[in-house]
Image (cartoon, grey):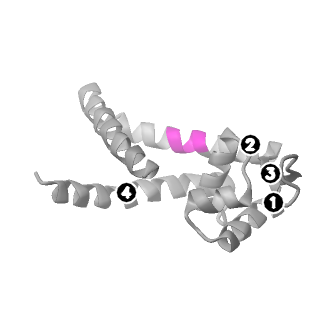
């Protein structure tokens, strides 16, 4: 199998996985909840960020990141707090409601996907984990460049 065939197979699986994740996300967060919103909540669950950080991480314009952040602020899932190191920017923090929405959505996604993986043997699951580890190492190297 060539790397081109492997890439084609990977690209055919990603939309299927994304659909499963979106279904679970919308069941928990509501129909208006999007994957980009979930990904911002995920990032903020690790550490506060600025809108510029969100734009850089999501690889979108500052304006697009600002609109995404504003939607999450209006939903009460994140809040802006003055940045003690830079008065021109605020730091974005998860609110309690944002933390709960993120945790609940993530838990449901994990339950749904792990339920699907239960149909595979332990050996098959080990192969998938090894493949994901290899893929992650290549993607992390790409991200650094």
Judged left or right of residue 135, residue 66 is: right
Could you say which disc has been placed on residue 91 in the image? 3
Q: Is residue 36 left or right of residue 133?
A: right
- Give the magenta range: 106-110
Mark 2, secondary structure of its residue? helix
State the residue position of label 4: 14
Whichever of labels 4 and 3 marks the residue nearer the N terminus, that label is 4
Q: Is residue 145 magenta?
A: no
Element class at badge 3: strand
Could you give the CA–CA distance between mark 4 and mark 1, rounded to whole angstroms? 29 Å
Disc number at residue 99? 2
Give left or right: position of 38 versus 76. Answer: left
Mark 4 and mark 1 residues within 8 Å of each other at the beta carbon: no
Q: Position of residue 42 (x, y in %)?
A: 63, 46
Of callouts 4 and 1, which one flags the residue occurring earlier in the amino acid sequence? 4
Looking at the image, which residue is at 36% across and 33% down? Answer: 118
Question: How packed is label 4: few (under 14 Cα within 10 Å), some, or many (20 or more)?
Answer: few
Label 3, residues with CA under 10 Å away: few <14, some 14-19, many ≥20: many
Residue at point 89% right, 52% down?
82
Q: Earlier in the sequence, mark 1 or mark 3?
A: 1
Outermost top residue: 122
> How far apart in space, not on screen, are marks 4 and 2 (Cα)?
26 Å
- Marks 3 and 2: in contact by CB < 8 Å? no
Label 4: element kind: helix
Which mark, by number, is residue 73?
1
Can residue 35 be seen from the camera position used here? no
Instruction: Tell me which corner region of the image, top left, top right, bottom left or bottom right, holds residue 38.
Output: bottom right
What separation in Å lies between label 2 and label 3 (alpha carbons)?
Answer: 16 Å
Q: Are marks 1 and 2 in contact (CB under 8 Å)?
A: no
- Classify residue 124 by image quadrant: top left
**Lower position in the chain sequence, tag 4 or tag 2:** 4
């Amino acid at each position: 199998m060539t790397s081109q065939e492997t890439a084609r197979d990977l690209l055919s699986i990603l939309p299927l996985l994304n659909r499963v994740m979106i279904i679970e996300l919308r069941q928990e967060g509501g129909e208006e909840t999007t994957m980009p919103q979930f990904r911002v909540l995920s990032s903020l669950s690790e550490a506060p960020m600025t809108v510029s950080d969100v734009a850089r991480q999501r690889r979108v314009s500052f304006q697009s990141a600002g609109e995404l952040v504003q939607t999450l602020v209006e939903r009460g899932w994140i809040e802006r707090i003055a940045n003690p190191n830079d008065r021109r920017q605020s730091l974005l923090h998860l609110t309690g409601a944002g933390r709960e929405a993120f945790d609940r959505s993530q838990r449901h996604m994990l339950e749904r996907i792990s339920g699907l993986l239960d149909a595979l043997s332990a050996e098959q699951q080990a192969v998938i984990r090894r493949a994901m580890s290899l893929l992650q190492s290549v993607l992390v190297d790409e991200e650094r460049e």
